Amino acid sequence: MNSIKVVLAKPGLDGHDQGAKVVARALMDAGFEVIYTGLRQTPEAIARIALDEDADVIALSSMAGSHLPICGKLKPLLEQAGLGDKLWIIGGNLPERDHARLRALGFKGIFPSSSRLEDIVNFIRANAP
Amino acid sequence: MKPVINESGIEIKPLYGAADVAASGGDAMIGPPGEYPFTRGIHPLMYRKQPFTMRQYTGFGNAADTNQRFHYLIANGQTGLNVAFDLPTQCGLDSDDPAAEGEVGRVGMAVDTLRDFETAFDRVDLERITVSLTVNGAAAVLIAMYLAMAEKRGYDIARLRGTAQNDILKEFIGRGTWVYPVEPSIRLVGDTIEYCARHAPKYSPVSVCGYHIRESGADPAQEMAYAFCIATAYADDVIRRGLPVDEFAGRLSFNFNCFGNIFEQVAKFRAGRSLWAKIMKERYGATKPGSMWLRMIAGGGGGGLTFEQPELNIVRGAYYALICALSGTQTMALCCYDEAYTIPSEYAQRISLRTMQMLIEEMGLGDTVDPLGGSYYVETLTNEMRARMESIMSEVDAQGGIVKLVAEGAIQAKVSAQAYRRQRDIEEGRFPKVGVNRYRTEDKTPQMEFHPYKEDDARAQVQALAKVRAERDAARVQTALARVEADARSGANLMPAIMEAVKAYASVGEITKVLVGVFGRYREPVRF
């Protein structure tokens, strides 16, 4: 069986990448194939990379509060790219009051600050298409 | 007995005595405060003469919102300002840039033109309140704006004090608000140092940050060692231009973190002070004491604060402030207890400010210089931390120097691997964190006052920019921008051209675009 392929992206201008890189390493250690995009990815770029890489999982890391506008823009782009059936997840500084809206935007896994690496790995294993 | 090893890799004994101090190098590098090598402090009387400046990091929304918070903090006894800019400003984008959408005024104050600086610092006495600008990729433009604003207000910039973060090399390691590739980025830092040395000699154009390298995963010894490597990269650039070391080194400043083991941090600061003095004296031949001073802001501690039981962060903050006060910092700032969740509320900011005030006014931290000096443990650890830092610096040099290692992503990969190991150690209980992997409670998190994001402010910012563009002298802007481009190509110091551009109300985005046209953009090396 092929390993699960994750595109892990830092959307927007947020430069806090310590968490994203820690998660990337945890996913690699779990045996997943990880494409880490680096900083400052536009929603268009994320959708394109996810399509080109044939990702099973599209994971975002957002620490600077712009997760709702970014996910709002990304949703139609991922759908247009035919990636609506992939697993979309997001982690970072995500206040609880925004979780329902993120879920409504198609983000099945929400991992706010203080989430455990093991929980992220297990969630992907259980939910990746 | 289980061995205890601190984060910097030094084994800690259960008891220290005079023999340990002697074995670690004795008192050769101690000396009195105010004298080389400044281990005990850069001034003879330290806080007895002047307590540390209290400078909480603040800024959000537009310039008018931020001006209001500035006056709140000043009214509550804060003695300096530390300005947070929004991400578009920090990345050199205007508020109406498509890439700025959703980010204008979100994590800091939005700045497009000199007009915003005029509003932000309205009624702030720039002689009494020193201002620190937390900006890096766009620092040259914002330093120019600050100087131009002060000049317009009638201040003599030759006497103006203040600081800009302007440390781009650490920005490539952590924090991420870079714009241009590595080499032109260093040139811009050099331009600001050279320009300020000649025209604004009291202004500190750079604050070299170990802080964010530590947040990215470095241990305390690496934090300081990497910062010194970076500071020497800037110094080398300026010296290559022919400026003597004593004409600029006195205005280099530093920014360090404070979370972790109390004694390890205190030893780090004391060791760092003497190591920096030694580097400036022996490697650069500095002769003025001021050139050898490790002037610093210490504080923050964000990496040590927890999302779990956030009220415990008030207690952590108090210990962090104690560490900084015991370490002889010139300026202090503290992350607030709610900062793992939100931009700090006024209430949280005030608790941090009161924490610092308490140390000086109630707890006697200002009474005596370097109160831990002479402790067998602290003196031994200070010597050992200095040796660790020196060996890390030699290692960097042997591998080709900090500029090469940062450009290749090698330092980034090293510290991020350490951050990953640390996270594993926390999750698996090997690295204790109270409230996280010890003494967890399932209590409901106390109510947080979430900082509101006002979409209307962002729209108003875009409209205000359009108005400035319509009202300014378009021909003057074009001429100024053409000179920025010409000077970028010729290799001339860019600051005079940028000063003229900001005075003509050219925007951050317009000036940055011209420079990107010449320098290109940084491409991040992704390496694990």
Image: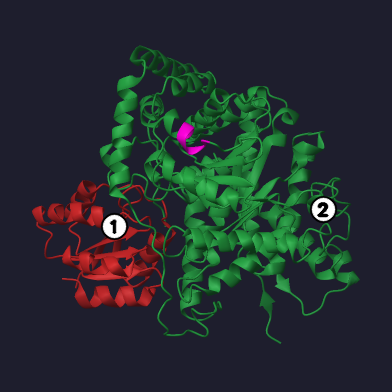
Kindly identify which residue carries mark 2. B48
How many C-alpha atoms fall within 10 Å of the one at disc 2: few (<14), some, or many (≥20)?
few
Relative horizontal placement of residue B293, taking residue A36 as reference (left or right)? right
Callout 2: chain: B
Relative horizontal placement of residue B381, taking residue A35 as reference (left or right)? right
Q: Secondary structure at mark 1?
A: helix
Is residue B7 at all visible to an observer of this figure?
no
Kindly identify which residue carries mark 1. A67
Q: Secondary structure at mark 2?
A: helix
Residue at 59%, 23% in the rendered image = B154
Residue B401, image quadrant: top right
Relative horizontal placement of residue B225, taking residue B487 as reference (left or right)? right
The tint of chain B in the picture is green
**What is the basis of the colouring in this image?**
by chain
Residue at 23%, 47% in the rendered image = A45
Is residue A8 at all visible to an observer of this figure?
yes
Please name the predominant secondary structure of the magenta segment in the image: helix
Relative horizontal placement of residue A52, taking residue B173 as reference (left or right)? left
Callout 1: chain: A
Residue at 40%, 81% in the rendered image = B444
In-front residue for pair B32/B499: B499
How many C-alpha atoms fall within 10 Å of the one at disc 1: few (<14), some, or many (≥20)?
many
Looking at the colours in the rendered structure, which chain would you say is drawn in red?
A
* Residue type highlighted by circle 1: His
Tell me where residue B98 appears, x and y as whole percent.
25, 39
Tell me where residue A111 appears, x and y as whole percent.
32, 70
> Of the residues tagged 2 and 1, which is closer to the observer?
2
Q: Measured along the vertical axis of the image, is residue B413 above or below residue B108? A: below
* Residue type highlighted by circle 2: Arg
In-front residue for pair B465/B486: B465
- Tell me where the magenta segment starts and ends, as one range: B117-122
Q: CA distance from mark 2 to mark 1?
A: 47 Å
